[in-house]
Amino acid sequence: MARITVLGGTGYTGSNIVKEAARRGHEVTSYSRKPTENPERGVSYVTASLIDSTERERAVADADVVVATLAPRGEMEAGFVDLYDDLATLASASGARFGVIGGFGSLRPFEGGPRMAFGDDVPAEYAAEGQTLATIAENLEKAAPKNLDWFFISPAAGYGSYAPGEATGRYRVGGDVVQFDENGQSFISGADFALAVLDEIDTPAHRRAQFSVMY
Ligand SMILES: NC(=O)c1ccc[n+]([C@@H]2O[C@H](COP(=O)([O-])OP(=O)(O)OC[C@H]3O[C@@H](n4cnc5c(N)ncnc54)[C@H](OP(=O)(O)O)[C@@H]3O)[C@@H](O)[C@H]2O)c1
């Protein structure tokens, strides 16, 4: 059993991760500004803004694993990269494992290529969010504290709250290069993505590495 703190544990990604972590018997704490309407049994829900550095310190303290599922939207948009840098520093100091949920645009079109979010092919409505997440991936890869045990997970292109999909119990793991299924699609449901996150927590296979999850 691990003490898992999910930042944004009431959101689309976070609530699926909270649910799966609680189902596996972990000690789970969620942080969000607003309370959830669908609490999971046994989960501690803290309502606080993580823009406040004191709350960030509180959130990371005593956790074995911190999973960041915040989104660079609204008041979170400005300063998002600095906020994640700060979380990485806090996790490094406390010895917590640090997992970041990133974007499809954080992946590379080919081995060694630039992350897609930095190119011209990302739809305008996703460009800013994609670049922010890709910058966090770059920072972890190039400048994470030496002792920080981090992982960065990119979901499939079609992943998102607008298409929750079904829980199938299966998923495929790739590296930091985009992959598509046999029909040329890139999708993963919210529940199956959470399975992959918890499998990584329970049996670490990607230390200081980015990986992707899709069907
Ligand atoms: N296909 C893709 O590439 C793709 C698709 C979707 C998402 N993503 C990525 O996955 C990650 C999660 O996205 P999502 O759509 O699951 O997010 P979401 O549903 O919007 O959830 C965000 C969570 O963060 C919390 N939050 C927001 N501001 C906060 C603050 N100041 N303090 C504390 N908590 C705060 C929200 O709760 P409150 O509002 O109550 O605070 C909520 O729990 C993001 O990095 C996103 O870019 C990638």
Image (tube, rainbow, N blue to C red):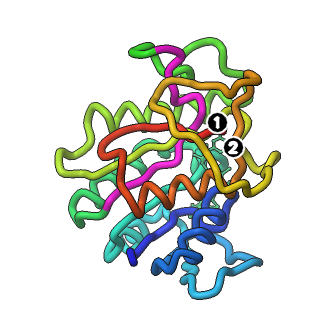
Give percent across and percent down for residue 58: 38, 74
User: Splitting the image into four quadrants, where does ligand 1 fall?
Assistant: bottom right
Q: Position of residue 75 (x, y in %)?
A: 61, 52
Mark 1 Cα shell of 10 Å, populated few (<14), some (14-19), many (≥20): many
Q: Is residue 151 left or right of residue 143?
A: right
In the rendered structure, the answer to whether residue 195 lies left or right of residue 158 reads: left
Residue 200 picture location, percent across and down: 43, 55
Rendered location of residue 95, percent (x, y) = 23, 64
Q: Residue lying farthest bottom? A: 42
Which residue is identified by label 1? 156
Say what amino acid the circle numbered 2 marks.
Ile
Q: Quadrant of residue 172?
A: top right
Asked if ligand 1 lies within 8 A of label 1, the reply is yes
Q: From what the image shows, is residue 30 above or below residue 196?
A: below
Total numbered circles: 2
Q: Is residue 141 above or below residue 89?
A: above
Pointer 2 or 1: first along the chain: 1
The answer to whether marks 2 and 1 mark residues whose Cβ atoms lie closer than 8 Å is yes
Q: Which residue is mark 2?
A: 188
Q: Which mark is residue 167?
A: none
Mark pair 2, 1: CA separation: 6 Å
Q: Residue at x 62, y 12 (%)?
A: 120
Magenta range is 97-110
On screen, residue 158 versus residue 82, left or right, reads right
User: Is-magenta flag for residue 32?
Assistant: no
Q: Quadrant of the C terminus?
A: top right
